[in-house]
Amino acid sequence: MTSAEPRARLSVRLRSATRSDHDEAQGSGFLDRLASGSLPRAAYADLATQHWFIYETLEQAAVVMAADPVAGPFVFPELTRLPALTDDLAVLTSQDRYAPLPATERYRARLREVAFDRPWAFIAHHYTRYLGDLSGGQYLGPAIAKAYGLDGPGHRFFVFDGVSPPAFRTRYRALLDDLALSPDDEGSLLAEVSEAYRLNIAVLADLKERWVEAFDLTPEAVAQIARHMNDDHAEDNVLIVRGLGGVGTASAARVSGLDADGMEFEATVDGIAVPVRIPFRERLTERRQVRGEAVRMYREACAALGITPEH
């Protein structure tokens, strides 16, 4: 009779059991588009907003679970993300209030349901979020910073001061392997990690629908619209930034980008390039609406400047 092979460590089984979930999250398309800079900066601000709500709830659970003999060792103050996210949002958006997406609300509801009183569930969600931040997040953060011209403020979420991600990952996995859980609780932990991935994937799907699918402004489409505005309506661009953008002395202006919420210009004032963003009246849902908004902005700019529109 041969002896049974030793059971794999919990950290190894976790990675093996969730490999497909991890790949699905990474392959959502939204994160890749952010890393390439092909989405507007507002899309990254939206991701930070959803993270803020998720971490607010998870870190409230951490306060409650800190004294738990099983879950408590996983509560590391140096991993706390909410202050960094608050600082990032102060740079990324001027909004005073932020809105969670439906998938984010479901994520928070699940955290409230299980992570405040079930050690295995808290560990499952803690592991999924923070080990992800200390793994793939260390590649995503610098890519986003480069894509959107952020130097410190705006992407502090990805920076763990005083923490060596490789060393911390090793330490964390050792904690997992030392867990003394019943077979039922261990099975529940594995299942909850998969649930945490599913919830995270749903948030990314909501973000993708908002920023990629519902408004089909591919980089090629944006370039085409900008080229048309700059080649055929260069004088209109100047009037728009003068009348609506607060740069009354602009001598030239070109469209530099746009998203579902507004159009971005680069105005020239005394030989210096000045960025100007003009918001649309409401969030657009179809590409064909861009033309109507451009005409509206031109007419409103003419009215503000006391000029009779030519078209």
Image: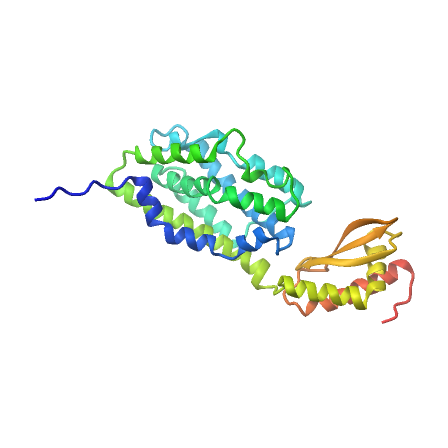
- In the rendered image, which quarter contains the N terminus? top left
Report the number of discs: 0
**Residue 11 position within the rendered picture, expressed as x and y whole percent measured from the top left:** 33, 40
Q: Residue at x 88, y 55 (%)?
A: 251
Q: Is residue 187 left or right of residue 218?
A: left
Q: Residue at x 33, y 32 (%)?
A: 70
Q: How is the image coloured?
A: rainbow
**Residue 117 position within the rendered picture, expressed as x and y whole percent measured from the top left:** 37, 37
**Residue 308 position within the rendered picture, expressed as x and y whole percent measured from the top left:** 91, 67
Residue 216 to residue 75: above or below: below
Of all residues shown, which one is farthest toward the bottom? 311
**Which of the 4 quarters of the picture holds residue 257?**
bottom right
Of all residues shown, which one is farthest toward the left? 1
Looking at this view, is 69 or 161 the one in front? 161
Q: Is residue 222 left or right of residue 139?
A: right
Q: Residue at x 84, y 59 (%)?
A: 238
- In the rendered image, which quarter contains the C terminus? bottom right
**Which of the 4 quarters of the picture holds residue 239?**
bottom right
Q: Residue at x 80, y 68 (%)?
A: 232
Q: Is residue 115 left or right of residue 140?
A: left
**Which of the 4 quarters of the picture holds residue 171?**
top left
